[in-house]
Amino acid sequence: MPGSTELLETIELATGPKGSVPRAAVIWMHGLGADGHDFEAIVPELRLPPSLAVNFVFPNAPMQPVTINNGHVMRAWYDVAFGDLEGRSRKPDEAGVRASVAHIERLIAREVARGVPSERIAIAGFSQGGAVALATGLRHAGRLAGIMALSTYLPLGDSLPAEAASANLQVPIFFAHGTADPVIPIEMATDSVQRLRQLGYPVQWQEYRMPHSVHPQEVVDIRDWLVKVLGT
């Protein structure tokens, strides 16, 4: 596992005219057992406007043993134990989530150092990656462009009221889920959305007839949302 101050390995893909300097960034986390290449192919599918130069950053989660997978070592943002899957509310590995939040904070800082202001950075993720996106974005001290949470749920919800960053109390949140998701039941997502809305966050909720995956219409909706929060 990378040390506490090391940057994660990333795959990066920039959009916009050849030779243009990205004016925005999307840091997008993969799900359990996948890697940074998992969502790389979605970038051309988004068909973003040519005028919108975005640096897509797909980090690789650290390698670590995962309890629910019999301790096999794989890329994971945090550990998952068998009891974590019971009921409507998961109790994730808090130390692991917070360690991953620290990793993503360093990637945000790198984009800012490259000249992209934080208000033009969106944090995104699928499944475990989406949980880390929410945990990071809602606590990040600087204003962000938005948070995209795909097929996931809100972790560390009990501590959020005390830890929420004032700069992001109105950050746009795109929250999408499949109606037939066997990995993270949709009720866990809707409970998370309700909790966020009770705290005053503006959440755009989308559901699709799909399992734990990405729907073609979802790609269109993601594009529209990114154009809205990042501009053209």
Image: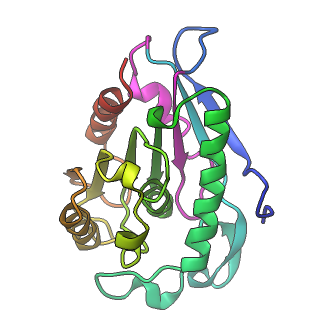
Query: Which residues, given as a range, are shown in magenta?
Result: 23-51
In the image, 219 versus 21, the foreground residue is 21
Q: Quadrant of the image for the N terminus?
A: bottom right
Q: For the point 50% across and 61% down, which residue is it?
A: 132
Residue 183 seen in render? no
Q: Toward which corner of the image does residue 164 lie, by quadrant?
A: bottom left
- In the figure, is residue 103 to the left or right of 9? left
Q: Quadrant of the C terminus?
A: top left
Q: Is residue 169 above or below residue 55?
A: below
Which residue of the protein is positioned furthest toward the bottom in this rendering? 83
- Looking at the picture, how far across and down is residue 19, in whole percent? 64, 8
Up-down relation of residue 80 to residue 177 (above or below): below
Q: Whole-percent x and y of residue 88?
A: 28, 82
Q: Residue at x 43, y 43 (%)?
A: 143
Residue 112 x %, y %: 61, 35
Asked whether residue 32 is drawn in magenta, I would say: yes
Q: Is residue 67 visible?
A: yes
- 209 w.r.t. 217: above or below: below
Between 133 and 70, the residue placed more toward the observer is 133
Residue shown at 67% from the left, 33% from the top: 113
Q: Position of residue 202 (x, y in %)?
A: 22, 50
